[in-house]
Amino acid sequence: MSQYDLQLKAFTVLNRAANASQEVTKKHALASNLNLTEFAVLEFLYHKGEQPIQIIGKKVLIASSSITYVVDKLEQKGFVHRKSCANDRRVTYAELTDLGEQQIAEIFPTHEQKISEIFEVLSNEEMETLIILLKRIGHHASNI
């Protein structure tokens, strides 16, 4: 197999694995009446606490034009609320409400279990190697 054919196959396998993994987590999020982006924002706030809305978008890979919409939807559901920054009026924070904290605390253990099931086919050594290789590919791709 030529280097190009190997690269194409690796790209296809990587994308199929990512899509299959996302499908598992997507089904779980939808079963909780959340879409994947809403779930990602709740999960991020659950682990990191209140955050500037712009930072949330960058960390959960949501376009800056979409993060406001996602936070609006979560606010309508009563899961988050906005809080102005006392030092900088340009910055707005989002934080979980008690209801949002309760929601993500209920569904996160199952999400964690699904992720564990996805990776149970790999040893710890294989996972460490996978992480190193994927980071290398990601950093290189971001510089192209």
Image (cartoon, rainbow, N blue to C red):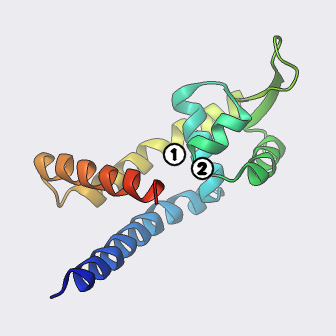
**Residue at the spot 61% in from the left edge and 43% down from the top edge:** 58
Instruction: From the top left corner, tell me how far across and down residue 120 is, in percent.
Output: 20, 56
Instruction: From the top left corner, tell me how far across and down residue 113 is, in percent.
Output: 35, 50
Q: In which quarter of the image is the N terminus?
A: bottom left
* Residue farthest toward the front in the current orientation of the protein: 144
Q: Which amino acid does label 1 sit on?
A: Ile
Where is mark 2, residue-wise?
A: 39
- Mark 1, other Cα within 10 Å: few <14 / some 14–19 / many ≥20: some
Q: What residue type is labelled 2?
A: Phe
Relative horizontal placement of residue 3, taking residue 46 as reference (left or right): left
Mark identifier at residue 107: 1
**Residue at the spot 60% in from the left edge and 49% down from the top edge:** 39
Q: In this view, does 88 lie above or below 103?
A: above
Residue toward you, 60 or 81: 60
Q: Is residue 51 above or below residue 10?
A: above
**Residue at the spot 66% in from the left edge and 58% down from the top edge:** 33
Q: Is mark 2 on a helix, strand or loop?
A: helix
Q: Are marks 2 and 1 in contact (CB under 8 Å)?
A: yes
Q: In this view, does 124 lie above or below 96?
A: below
**Residue at the spot 50% in from the left edge and 59% down from the top edge:** 28
Q: In which quarter of the image is residue 80?
A: top right
Q: Earlier in the sequence, mark 2 or mark 1?
A: 2
